[in-house]
Amino acid sequence: MKKPSFKFKSLTEADLPMLADWLSRAHLQKWWREEEITIERIRDKYLPRIFGEDDARPYLVYLDNSPVGYIQFYHAWINQAWWPDKPEKGVLGIDQFIAEENNLGKGIGSRFIAEFVKQLFENPEITEVRVDPKPDNERAIRCYKKVGFKKAGQINTPDGPAMMMVLKRKTFLGKYQ
Ligand SMILES: CC(C)(COP(=O)(O)OP(=O)(O)OC[C@H]1O[C@@H](n2cnc3c(N)ncnc32)[C@H](O)[C@@H]1OP(=O)(O)O)[C@@H](O)C(=O)NCCC(=O)NCCS
């Protein structure tokens, strides 16, 4: 069977109506917080990311040339208010979702996240990548464990309680090289 091929394309302004449509879907409501999903609010939030004026860098995930999801990384040391341990330079955070509900739980997320993290670690300055799912997001936690993230304890973020999960460069390279 042909190995699926994932590509990450920087989000553009032209993608925002599609992103707004995705974000309004029922399977994301509990796990992806948006205060209000109107095209104006989505533009206000995501245009600074598109233009590099925000610490998050947004991408669409393509599987065999079709957009299937969204992923972003952010420089965790810039927004020191987010995590209680105030991470050092070199620590990145990621957030992601799959657009179609019937694509959940089929191994797509763990494969594109592993590929994205591999690309992040190509920068030698990156020491670790973290995710902070809600503690009851069992599907996401299971997915991140498969990629190699390890639970590092429950924390409180401005978004509420979260399970901190950490993937260190050494662990990742040991698993995938
Ligand atoms: C989180 C997300 C990106 C993971 O991608 P995915 O393709 O669903 O993940 P995978 O299929 O690779 O792995 C999920 C695992 O959880 C399992 N799973 C599915 N539903 C589950 C549930 N309700 N409880 C526990 N495990 C569950 C799957 O069987 C799979 O494990 P397995 O491969 O051992 O069988 C995707 O589920 C998603 O977009 N969820 C909605 C948005 C979201 O939660 N985003 C994350 C915010 S931190």
Image: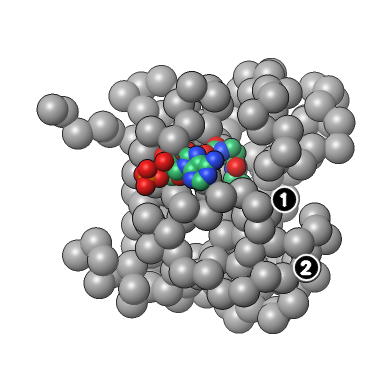
* Location of the C terminus (image quadrant): bottom left
Residue shown at 34% from the left, 73% from the top: 171
Mark yes or no: residue 79 visible: yes
Q: Decide: is 20 above or below 116.
A: above
Q: Looking at the picture, how far across and down is residue 70, in whole percent?
A: 55, 36
The reply to whether residue 73 is in sight is no
Lower sequence index among marks 1 and 2: 1
Toward the viewer: 170 or 133?
133
Query: Which residue lies under the disc numbered 2?
Result: 156
**Image check: 6 left or right of 126?**
left
Residue at the far left: name it: 1
Image quarter (top left, top right, bottom left or bottom right) of the N terminus = top left
* Way the structure is coloured: one colour
In which quadrant of the rendered view does residue 65 lie?
top left
Secondary structure state at the residue bearing disc 2 = strand
Front position in the image: 105 or 7: 105
Q: Is residue 112 left or right of residue 56?
A: left
**Element marked by disc 1:** loop
Query: Which residue type carries mark 1?
Result: Glu
Q: Tell me if mark 2 has few (under 14), some (14-19) or many (20+) residues whose alpha carbon lies within 10 angstroms of its own.
A: some
Cα–Cα span, label 1 and label 2: 26 Å
* Residue kind at label 2, given as amino acid type: Asn
Label 1: how many residues lie within 10 Å, few (<14), some (14-19) or many (20+)?
few
Say whether marks 1 and 2 touch (CB < 8 Å).
no
Q: Which residue is mark 1?
A: 53
- Which numbered circle lies on residue 83? none
The number of callouts visible is 2
Residue at point 70%, 79% (across, down): 86
Rendering coords of residue 12 (x, y %): 60, 30
Question: In which quarter of the view is residue 147 placed?
Answer: bottom left
Residue placed at 72% from the left, 50% from the top?
53
Q: Position of residue 51 (x, y in %)?
A: 67, 42
